Amino acid sequence: MQEWVNKRNDAVHATAKVFRDETSDQGFRSILRSHKETAEEGIRHLQAFDLLDTESRQKAEKIPASWPDAFFRTGGLETRS
């Protein structure tokens, strides 16, 4: 998880440089493309956490945080290209 957090931070800082008009050797679309894998990895981490949270809340007879489908479209990330 910490490895992903570091990649996510790099992506956020690279994007912020473009928005603050600081020196950036990439444009916004290029930065988005270069960090697509990091974003998708983050979605997978969130989905895994959601499964744990849902199971825990069901045992406690509480509504899961992502109910009903607050975070994910039907079919999940793996069905998109």
Image (cartoon, helix red, strand yellow):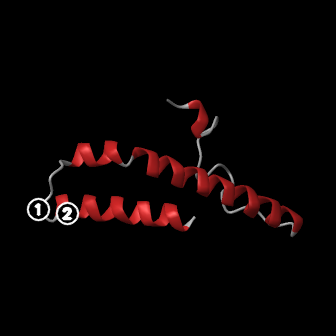
Q: Work out whether 25 lies above or below 64.
A: above
- Hey, what amino acid is under mark 1? Thr
Question: What residue is rendered at 81% in x and 66% in y?
Answer: 56
Relative depth, front residue between 57 and 29: 29
Q: Residue 17 carries which label?
A: 2
Label 2 with label 1: CB-CB less than 8 Å:
yes
Q: Where is residue 62 in the image (x, y as percent from the top left)?
A: 81, 67
Which quadrant, please, contains the N terminus? bottom right
Q: Left or right: where does residue 11 sit relative to residue 74?
A: left
Residue 19 at x, y percent in the picture: 18, 60
Residue type at mark 2 is Lys
Whole-angstrom CA distance, mark 2 to mark 1, is 7 Å
Q: Is mark 2 on a helix, strand or loop?
A: helix
Asked whether, in this view, residue 47 is left or right of residue 24, the answer is right
Element assignment for label 1? loop
Residue at image position (18%, 58%) is: 18
Furthest residue in direction front, as rendered = 3
> How would you rate the neighbour count of disc 1 (Cα within 10 Å): few for under 14, some for 14-19, many for 20 or more?
few
Residue 61 badge: none
Q: In which quarter of the image is residue 46?
A: bottom right
Q: Where is residue 59 in the image (x, y as percent from the top left)?
A: 88, 65
At 64% across and 49% down in the image, what residue appears? 69
The residue beneath circle 1 is 23
Residue under the image location 75 percent in, 61 percent down: 52
Give coordinates of residue 38: x percent, y percent: 45, 51
